[in-house]
Amino acid sequence: MTHRPLRALIVEDEPVAARRLQRVLHDILGDRLATLTRASDLDQAAGAMVDSGCDLILLDLDLDGQDGFALLDLVASASALTIIVSAHAELAVRAFEYGVVDFVPKPYTPQRLKRALARLETPHPEREGTHRFLGVQDRGETRVVDVLTIERIAAAGDYAELTLVSGEGLLHARSLDALMVTLPDRFARVHRSPIVNLDRIVRLRAASGGRYAVELRSGVSVPVGRRRYPDLKARLAGPAPTTRPEGPTPDEG
């Protein structure tokens, strides 16, 4: 994420705290920081997201009495990723449910913030936290979706297409790579494009032509790349019925 220029937004009502975040971000990101905007309240933050756009938001949850969670519903439907920087550590679990990348408790060290930013670059397959919600723009309004209701996700141009258990399709502004940062570890990238909810897999099998695939509860078959097959097989709980193909298996390309 931070390998390309980043447009960052700091949402912090305390001027001293905001200036410190600015300094630390400049020190850590250097020339990767394309723009850096500061907002001191929710209206300014929402306006900055619309006017300037942003890839990364550092958000305080207590903005002079305003609740930062009100912004998370809006952020969840945008392409930006969020790191919470807050003294209210007791809110961490709730924040992770909204898909934030990390929760940095105040007071923080530059090293701690650097670790949070590193999660944008190298998301670990066993992500911590309970990231339970994503927001999508649906007919002009922000709709918050429980990730457990998502069966699969696929690339759709500059967007990601979410297919819910109900069969409904929704578009999300984040890329697949960005979504994988925040999705819980029950989701796996099984090919160049598809992400699947492991709890929706019925079986792992060999599809026609000797290619691997997973069959989902909806009856949909999703291709599995050869390089991703061993990890996927290991992550599927229990002795799932699996048919191994004979002879060489084509790679995922």
Image (cartoon, helix red, strand yellow):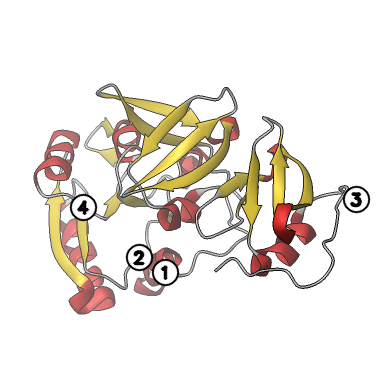
Classify the position of the C terminus by image quarter.
bottom right
Does residue 243 appear to the left or right of 221 in the view shown?
right
**Residue 25 location, quadrant:** bottom left
Residue under label 3: 239
The kind of residue on which mark 3 rests is: Pro
2 vs 3, front mark: 3
Residue under label 4: 54
Please provide percent x and percent y for residue 41: 17, 38
Residue under label 1: 121
Please provide percent x and percent y for residue 54: 21, 52
The kind of residue on which mark 2 rests is: Met
Classify the position of the N terminus by image quarter.
bottom left
Q: Are marks 2 and 4 in contact (CB under 8 Å)?
A: no
Which of the marked residues, 3 or 4, is nearer the chain's N terminus?
Answer: 4
Q: Are marks 1 and 2 in contact (CB under 8 Å)?
A: yes
Q: Is residue 7 above or below residue 45?
A: below
Which of the marked residues, 1 or 4, is nearer the chain's N terminus?
Answer: 4
Does residue 28 appear to the left or right of 178 in the view shown?
left
Residue under label 2: 1
**Residue 29 location, quadrant:** bottom left
1 vs 3, front mark: 3
3 vs 4, front mark: 3
Which of the marked residues, 1 or 2, is nearer the chain's N terminus?
Answer: 2
**Real-space CA distance between mark 2 and mark 3, rounded to the nearest whole angstrom:** 36 Å
